[in-house]
Amino acid sequence: MILVVGGAGYIGSHLVKDLAANREVLVLDNLSTGHLVSLDYKADFVEGDLRDATLLDNLFSKYPIEAVMHFAAASLVGESVSHPLKYYENNVVATFNLLKAMLKHDVKNFIFSSTAATYGLPDIEHIDETVATAPINPYGQSKLMIEQMLADFGNAYGLQYIALRYFNAAGAHETGEIGESHTPETHLIPIILQHLVGVREKVSVFGTDYATPDGTCVRDYIHVTDIAKAHIIALDALLSGKVKNEIYNLGNGQGYSVKEVITACEMVTGLKARVEESERRAGDPGRLVAASKKIETELGWKAEQNLMQIIESAWKWHKNQRY
Ligand code: UDP
């Protein structure tokens, strides 16, 4: 059985939907941001929080868990700057509790959701895993601290892990049943699409003076289904002993500016956005684009869906939401 922590959240629910087709899955989620409705398939569900050591103890005693996939985290760059306590508690302390319970119960396999925010402001076109980490916001810092715990626990206690550093997750499941929905929503693609379905007045572009071709931030958008596939490949590689204690980037290798993403959304939907230029958002690097060669070479994973496909799937989902 695979324990998926945060399996009711955006990325976790996409993974669970695919993983549960072939494996027994148990989801632990505190439903702080996740949605039970996204778990309408064959996975067991426990509502609970990683701050509850007794709950974790009971869970690992009761279920035959062979690996843990950990998606539960606070993940908003801007919020992490204004509310770092939340990030060190929800991310670092909570993951520490989870790892401690795992080690106590001799569960040694761990797949971790990390982030490109660990890199900070690398002045490099395509970031690979050898680039030095230097996060510029507490979100990235909290994820890097967890990666450091993983390395130390790997050395000392035989923990076996793979950390996947996602670039910008976006898109929705091909069935249109689940998609990206945060409250409040802060992510670019859902914000644009919510505006285009008419539940938001306009789209604000955060900063037009970055050192990028059109002055707006450049990101590498990766389909949530591609991310889910990478997790399944990583899990199989870990459980079969093919690799352990590795960090892999997950990206498309293509950078798109905020303005380009808005244009792409207009093309997919056939609708025109009302766009307003505004101040930079705290903690945002100008450019983050991945080199994902390492996971391609070692595990055979490659992003399959491009920005237009990401937006098409997200649009299919957003159109059917009742806001
Ligand atoms: N962004 C923007 N307007 C918005 C939301 C986001 O201009 O309403 C920008 C944001 O500053 C960043 C990019 O879009 O440069 C992607 O932001 P998002 O929050 O989607 O992901 P992040 O890169 O923070 O993980």
Image (tube, helix red, strand yellow):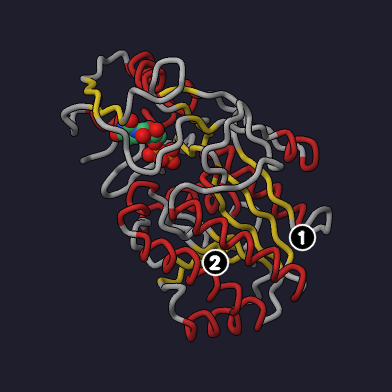
* Residue 190 shows in this picture: no
Quarter of the picture containing the C terminus is top left
Left or right, 263 with reference to 70: left
Above or below residue 163? Residue 217 is above
Q: Residue at x 71, y 37 (%)?
A: 301
- Image depth: mark 2 or mark 1 in front: 1
Quarter of the picture containing the N terminus is bottom right
Residue 248, quarter of picture = top right
**Position of residue 286 measured from the top left corner of the image (x, y, whole percent):** 45, 31
**Disc number placed over residue 270 in the picture, else none:** none
Label 2 environment density (alpha carbons within 10 Å; few <14, some 14–19, many ≥20): many
Left or right, 87 with reference to 307: left
**Position of residue 281 measured from the top left corner of the image (x, y, whole percent):** 32, 38
Query: Type of residue at label 2?
Result: Leu
* Residue 130 shows in this picture: yes
Query: Type of residue at label 1?
Result: Leu
Q: Residue at x 50, y 30 (%)?
A: 287
Label 1 environment density (alpha carbons within 10 Å; few <14, some 14–19, many ≥20): some
Which of the two labelled residues, at mark 2 and mark 1, occupies the earlier sequence position? 2
**Disc number placed over residue 26 in the picture, else none:** 2
Above or below residue 227? Residue 27 is below
Above or below residue 75? Residue 222 is above
Q: Residue at x 21, y 20 (%)?
A: 274
Residue placed under numbered mark 1 in the picture: 239
Q: Secondary structure at mark 1?
A: helix
**Position of residue 180 measured from the top left corner of the image (x, y, whole percent):** 38, 42
Q: CA distance from mark 2 to mark 1?
A: 17 Å
Left or right, 275 with reference to 266: left
Nearest the viewer among 239 and 39 is 239
Residue reaching furthest to the left: 201
Above or below residue 34? Residue 227 is above
